[in-house]
Image (cartoon, rainbow, N blue to C red):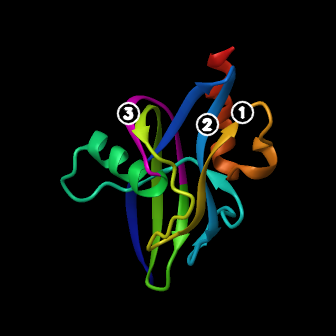
Amino acid sequence: MKKKVIRFAQKAIVLKKKNNKVLMLLVKYKSAPFKNTYTVEGKYGCPGGKPDFGEDLDESLIRECKDETGITVVPKDPVGLISWQVEKPDEITHMIAVFRICKAVKGKLKTFVNEKETQLEKSEWVDIKKFDFDKNLIEDEIPIVKKVFQYLK
């Protein structure tokens, strides 16, 4: 029988205005070596990840965003929550992630990212009016991102 564990993660919703456009920071997944309850390969998602043991939650999200995108953020309020399962050969992990609004403060965008557990293809600022979120965003993240966009109106 596989070990069952619960893990916590954070995801950053990072928006900025540039040239009269609202841009959102996303990462594109190249592959996922373990079975997820949703498809991530070829999809975009919000940057983020799990805190290290004893790590401050704000520092964790700052570190994860910087590692995945090259952008330093300031975490703000939580705006949503999702959960999913990841199946590995020896365990089933129930992931619980909180989404937080974050402000980009500095940094140069990474164009190539190589993470241990999930291969990220790239990070990118996308124009929220031109990007097809329904087609290209990880399925479970769509409702939370759209909820945030309602507040922008």
Q: Main secondary structure of the magenta part?
A: strand
Q: Which mark is residue 24?
A: 2
The kind of residue on which mark 3 rests is Pro
- Residue 9: in sight, yes or no? no
Q: Which residues are magenta?
A: 70-83
Q: CA distance from mark 1 to mark 2?
A: 6 Å
The kind of residue on which mark 2 rests is Met
Q: CA distance from mark 3 to mark 1?
A: 20 Å
Does the magenta portion include 145?
no
Q: Which residue is mark 3?
A: 75
Q: Earlier in the sequence, mark 1 or mark 2?
A: 2
Do the residues under discs 1 and 2 have CB atoms within 8 angstroms?
yes
Q: Which residue is mark 1?
A: 128
Q: Earlier in the sequence, mark 3 or mark 1?
A: 3
Q: Is residue 61 left or right of residue 125?
A: left
Classify mark 1: helix, strand or loop: loop
Q: Is residue 56 left or right of residue 125?
A: left
Q: Nearer the viewer, residue 146 or 107?
A: 107
Q: Is residue 42 left or right of residue 99?
A: right
Residue 128, quarter of the rendered image: top right
